[in-house]
Amino acid sequence: MTEPIPDYEACRRDGVLRVRREGTEWLSTGADGGRTRGECAYNVSVPEGWTRTDLAAYVDERLERAGFDVGDADASGERPPALLTGVDIADARGARCGPVMAYATAGVSNPAALPMEPPGGSLPTDLEPATDDDHSTPGTVNVVVGTTHSLPDGALANLIAVTAEAKAATLLETTGFPGTTTDAVVVGHDPDGRSTRFSGSGTAVGAATRACVREAVRASLSAHYEDHDVGCPASVEEATYGVSTDVRATVFEPPTLE
């Protein structure tokens, strides 16, 4: 029996995962993220010891080396969304449910723990936000989600929240951590598809996204650890890199206006 062509087809070549569907509008949380319209989104695996900081140029080099012509793939002239990861693209896995497909690469050598009873203390003055160019943290859980439905701006943005929530729930159950210091998400929709007003967890798009993210992340974790006979770290201390948010915030009640 011939398998149907996926609505968001993907292929891997030379350490690059390409997710492609004509006419897609994307929203990315990556380093050069934001909203773009074009055919493709990419997830690029970086080598161990990677130190490049010119991210756009590096992505262009990797796409060209892999034989992906950005100029031909993206007729809009906008840069396609591209995420960076220390996880081997061979460990990428996809999942499909209803109007949604998701692709994930998952590794937690740089876990970001969030204890519910932290010891407290002050926020470190030298703490910097982790980004995709933080080459000291080579793990990363990257997820690319696409739906064949058409979503308004708010629902597309909310799909990032739904994806992140599903990713965190899956990681907590399977690894004990809600994420890593460099996680990123790309979501896409078809502006000409079936119009759908909302994307929350109780909607068809939201529920399908949660299922796809859960399965894709679990499958990628299995490929990354079990298939390679490598263990997932049991704690931040055991991880190669990682952080624990041990500082406590001050709780207050907003004032009521008379």
Image (spheres, rainbow, N blue to C red):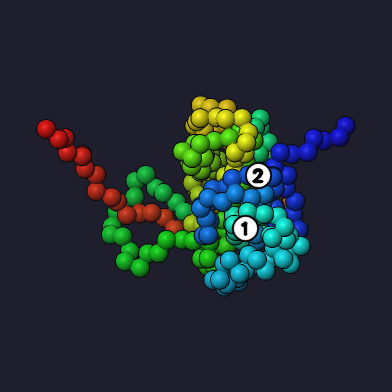
Taking the image as shown, residue 82 lies to the left or right of residue 115, namely right
**In this rendering, does residue 114 appear at all?**
yes
Residue bearing mark 1: 77
Q: Give coordinates of residue 33: x percent, y percent.
A: 52, 55
Q: What amino acid is labelled 2 in the image?
A: Gly
Residue 248's place in the image compared with 167, above or below, is below
How packed is label 1: few (under 14 Cα within 10 Å), some, or many (20 or more)?
few
**Front position in the image: 105 or 38:** 38
**Mark 2 in CB contact with mark 1 (< 8 angstroms):** no
Quote the CA–CA distance across marks 2 and 1: 13 Å
What residue occupies the far front of the structure in this picture? 76
- Tell me, for residue 23, which label it has, or none: 2
How packed is label 2: few (under 14 Cα within 10 Å), some, or many (20 or more)?
some
Image quarter hosting the C terminus: top left
Image quarter hosting the N terminus: top right
- Identified at 76% across, 58% down, the residue is 13
- Which element is circle 1 on? loop
